[in-house]
Amino acid sequence: MRRDLLVFIAFAFALVFPAPGFSQSSKSSLMAKSPAVDVKALTNKANSGIPEAQYELAFAYHSGVEVDKSDFEAMRWYRMAANSGHTGAQNNLGYLYETGPDGLKNMAEAVKWYQRAAIYGSAMAQFNLGRLYLLGRGVPQSNEEALRWMQKSVDAGCPSALAALSGMYATGRGVPQDPHQALKLAQKAAKQHSPQGEAALGVLYVDGLGVPKNLPEGVKWLNKAAQNGNATGQYALGMLYETGEGVKRDTNVAIRLFRLAAEQGLTTAQALLGQIYELGQGVAADRKEAVTWYRQAAHQGDAESATRLGTILVRGQGVDKDIDSAVPLLTMAADKGNEYAQFHLAELYASGAGVQRDLQKAYSLFTLAGKKLDASKQLKEISSQLNRERSQANNVAETTNDR
């Protein structure tokens, strides 16, 4: 059963890959007063230098409200408001620098703007800064700093920080593991209608952490989180439907929930969908669909997905063979210690397929893979080839010297 990582997954997503609604400051009073956004009037106010209007216009571009979504336009207007001291704009500017598309991403800038907003009291920025310290992203990893900023955010009433802090206590990440404290924080977040808090509470009930195991109660909270669009709630609920624990087993519902979570960027869901479609688990095998999901998970650094995708591309299994694209995927996964990636990459270096032939590199990679896999045959063959090549090189050198 895949639930052995359920608790970690339920909290890690919020920390590592925050969804837009989770880590951004939301729209403020100007936009909230009217369901429709008068973009022309808002643009005029923004151009006249009103920070709140600049923030509202940036948020509209960021969210695609009444205008075509544009992260670049959002960044431009957020920066104007941020430079005037608007903490919501500072936080969202940091978020864009952290999670935006290539060309925008810049962790040093993300940290700078999160810090600026956090110091001036933005609860969401305090949460974001604590998250970065916990992960060591853009700043030196520090459990003490992570806890300090998370607690400040909690004290300021941020439900997202409550849920994240609950996760820290549930997993023992950055703090001593304390399921009862995790439960208390998750309940408080859920009472504030935090979807992440609802997901956290559901997971705790399902796994019996800090509270007696109660599947109906867990399903209730996971359903709430899933219906409120929370990716981890969707994923966790999907796992229950996949196994029939606490609900009637329904593979179709499980896959639908996994897909919803994956579309929001949950790496674990993307990786799982890739395996489901590659292996035909509950659906017809579809390598092209598998490649789509593996590619998204690999882009977010998932080593197993990168390995599986690289292997499919090397072999051309149900898709066009593409060794050039496979090599960087396998290299990334091999560098992260995936033994299968190390093995397959070694094969490429041994044969010279997609890379310059390098027996020494191949031998090194087979040696690493051999710590967990049986690579004795390959190591023996490459050792023999290296010995022959050395012998041939020595013979050539001797012949040259005789002349």
Image (tube, grey):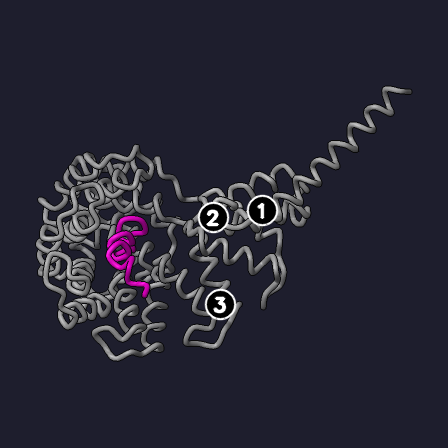
244 relative to 346, above or below? below
Nearer to the camera, 239 or 49: 239
Q: CA distance from mark 3 to mark 1?
A: 29 Å
SS assignment for the magenta stretch, majority:
helix
Q: Nearer the viewer, mark 3 or mark 1?
A: 1
Q: Which mark is residue 376?
A: 1
Q: Which residues make up the magenta segment?
A: 1-21
Question: Is label 3 in a helix, a strand or a loop?
Answer: helix
Question: How far, Cα to Cα, is label 2 from label 1?
Answer: 11 Å
The x and y percentages for residue 256 are 34, 73
- The answer to which of 129 and 233 lies nearer the viewer is 233
Which numbered circle lies on residue 278?
3
The residue identified by callout 2 is 372
- State which mark lies toward you, 2 or 3: 2
The amino acid on which the numbered mark 2 sits, given as a three-letter code, is Lys
Q: Is residue 68 left or right of residue 41?
A: right
